Image: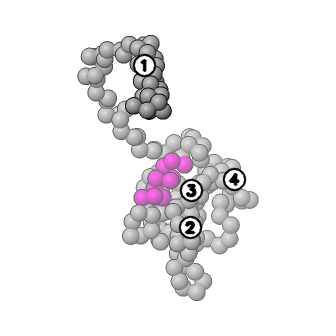
Amino acid sequence: MSAPRIRAVASIAGATLIAAALASCSAPAEKPDPAASSAVPSPSASAAEAPVLVPDGTATDNLALFTAVTAKVWGSDDRARGREYVDALVAAGFPKDRMQVTADQSTVGRAAESLQFSVAWGDEECLIGQVGTSTGEPVTAVMPQLAGGRCLVGRTRPIDW
């Protein structure tokens, strides 16, 4: 064997011995606890809880439910209909008399590229949703109320159903 090859083999052998020595210095592996391995998580711990309306909470407390309702309607065939968002939010417990929604169609009769809907919450906050082809995925947020307790800027359609 040539001298460079001998040095390479010796170097590898030395590194292997150092690695083995370091491994023997580590703490011994703990034995598994038989009681722990038989434990099964409870259904409530493993399942994510569905959001619920918190009537006495803040808009932020209710954003998760607002977002979930928005996502559900967005995933349906009626995703471009403002009434569907309003009806779904009412079914979830949000107060219809505090809602606003924009028109489903543009002023020239085409499907709106963006649809907005809101729920005024308390005296200072709004839950606002926006969906549409120009938005991509649904967007929901908590924003401050505008003058007069409104949440949306511009013309909205009457919620008279």
Position of residue 149 relative to residue 33, above or below, is below
Q: Split into 4 quadrants, where in the image is the N terminus?
A: top left
**Percent x, y for residue 150?**
67, 60
User: Distance from label 4 to label 3 (Cα)?
Assistant: 13 Å
- Asked if one can make out residue 49 in the rendered structure from this viewpoint, the answer is yes
Residue at the disc numbered 3 = 140
Q: Earlier in the sequence, mark 4 or mark 2?
A: 2
User: Distance from label 4 to label 2 (Cα)?
Assistant: 21 Å
Q: Amino acid at mark 1?
A: Leu
User: Distance from label 4 to label 1 (Cα)?
Assistant: 67 Å
Residue at the location (56% across, 56% down)?
140
Circle nearer the viewer, 4 or 3: 3
Residue at the disc numbered 4 = 144
User: Distance from label 3 to label 1 (Cα)?
Assistant: 60 Å
Mark 4 is surrounded, within 10 Å at the Cα level, by few (under 14), some (14 to 19) or many (20 or more) other residues, namely: some
Circle nearer the viewer, 4 or 1: 1
What stretch of residues is rendered in magenta?
63-72
Q: Taking 99 as reference, is 125 left or right?
A: right
**Percent x, y for residue 48?**
40, 40
Residue at the location (60% across, 54% down)?
141
Residue at the disc numbered 2 = 135
